[in-house]
Structures are given as structure tokens and as C-alpha cells.
Image (cartoon, rainbow, N blue to C red):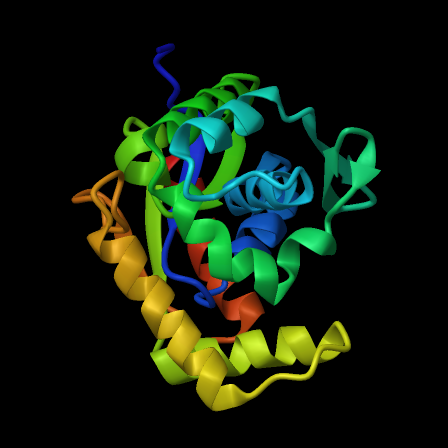
Amino acid sequence: MKDITEVVAIDGPAGAGKSTVARRLAERLGFRFLDTGAMYRAATWWALDQDIDLDDALAVAQATQSMPLELKDEEGVQRAMVDGRDVSQAIRTPEVTREIYRLDQNRAVRAHLVALQQAFGALGPTVAEGRDMGTVVFPKAKCKFFLDASLDERTRRRAVDLAAAGRSVDVATLRAEIHERDEKNRNREVAPLIRAKDAMLVDTTAMTLDEVVDHIAGLVRAKW
């Protein structure tokens, strides 16, 4: 693998604000933005769309490897395109969210997507967000951050996002789903969600989006 260092790696659990913070930070710094979660979501959506048995690890891996995926930046928004179709909204449905852990735990799927992520990061300064950016994908990233927030706050943020998208939500069920996903991500055998030893912890529970971006941008500029 190429020695990729021109990367700001942002990891953390669901609802900690990684995607929004990373996107805003990339805009602020003039870097490229990489939403790796969208890649796993797209692969999950693609497998479901192709009627792949998600319990068939080999079939899922083959489907992911053949998936015609493109991440396109349009007017400050990164869109996920699969086979020429904009699936940016489709990959955020509860159905995809419930099944994504199956692909998270598939070694062949991860190997393929990690290679794509590293190729993206090799193209120039990048802000990459996910759950194993600082530990697996970009272990030599110049700056690493681990964003976290309380479970209740992360649930509240996710509920707001879903409501804005016109989706009804039961908060108690949503909280349980996020907690379950946390446990699966932290305890999975392949690339578990952990804070890299050299990653700076940022607790976003009581911080506004602007405060988080300002804080991280200042740290990045001091080190870059």
C-alpha cells in the first residue's frame, strides 16, 4: 500500500456527527471528502436490490466486487451512484441500516472497499470518516480523531434526521437499534470500532456542529 499520510481520519459510533463534521471540515480545509459509511450502505443496498442472500458470504462479496459504485461531489454534497442510479437516499433507509452489519463483518467485502478507500485517499488531501479509518484504512494518517457522544444524544440526532426525511420513528426502538449496532461494531472480529492510540477524542454531546468543526480545524491546521 502506498504510504498515505495526507488524510484526516475521523472515526466514531453512529450518531456522533462524523459525516456532517467531516463534510464541513473538508469544505473548510479545501480537502476531498470520503464518506466510507456510504460505501458499505451502497454495498448493502446493492445486495438487497440484487436479491442476494445476505447469509451467503461469498455471494455478498462477489456482488460487492462487481458493484459499479461512484461517489460524486455535487454542490457540496457527496452522492452515491450505483449502476448510474443516485441511491443517496435509498441507502439511508432503516432496512439498509438493519442489515449493514452483515457486510461490516465480511472480510472479502471489507478488503475490497478498503482498497477503494485507500485509492481515494491517495489522490490528494482527504477527510475520511468511518469506523476504522485511523486503525485499518489510513493507519499513517497525519491527523486522527475519534468522535463520540452519549447514546441519548446520538439517538436524538438520528431521530431528527429521520423526521427531516419524512420517516416516522419510535425513539425507544431507535435507541435500542443504535445500541445494538454499537455492540456489533465494537465486538466484531474484523476491524472492530476502537479508538486508535494516536487519535484525539472529541466528545460532541454538548457541542454544536460549528464548535466541533472549529475545534478540529484548529487542531488540523496546527499539525498540517
Residue 208 drawn above or below residue 105: below
Can residue 91 be seen?
A: yes
Residue 22 drawn above or below residue 203: above
Quadrant in the picture for residue 148? bottom left
User: In this image, 61 relative to 96: left or right?
Assistant: left
Q: Nearer the viewer, residue 12 or 224?
A: 12
Quadrant in the picture for residue 35? top right
User: In this image, 52 relative to 224: left or right?
Assistant: right
Task: Residue at the far top: name it.
Answer: 2
Q: Nearer the viewer, residue 95 or 85?
A: 95
At 60% from the left edge and 34% from the top edge, which residue is drawn?
Answer: 31
In the rendered view of the protein, which quadrant contains the N terminus?
top left
Residue 39, image x and y in percent?
A: 56, 39
At 64% from the left edge and 58% from the top edge, which residue is drawn?
Answer: 92
Residue 134, image x and y in percent?
A: 31, 38
Can residue 205 be seen?
A: no
At 37% from the left edge and 38% from the top edge, which residue is drawn?
Answer: 133
In the rendered view of the protein, which quadrant contains the C terminus?
top left
Residue 205, image x and y in percent?
A: 40, 78
Residue 79, image x and y in percent?
A: 74, 42
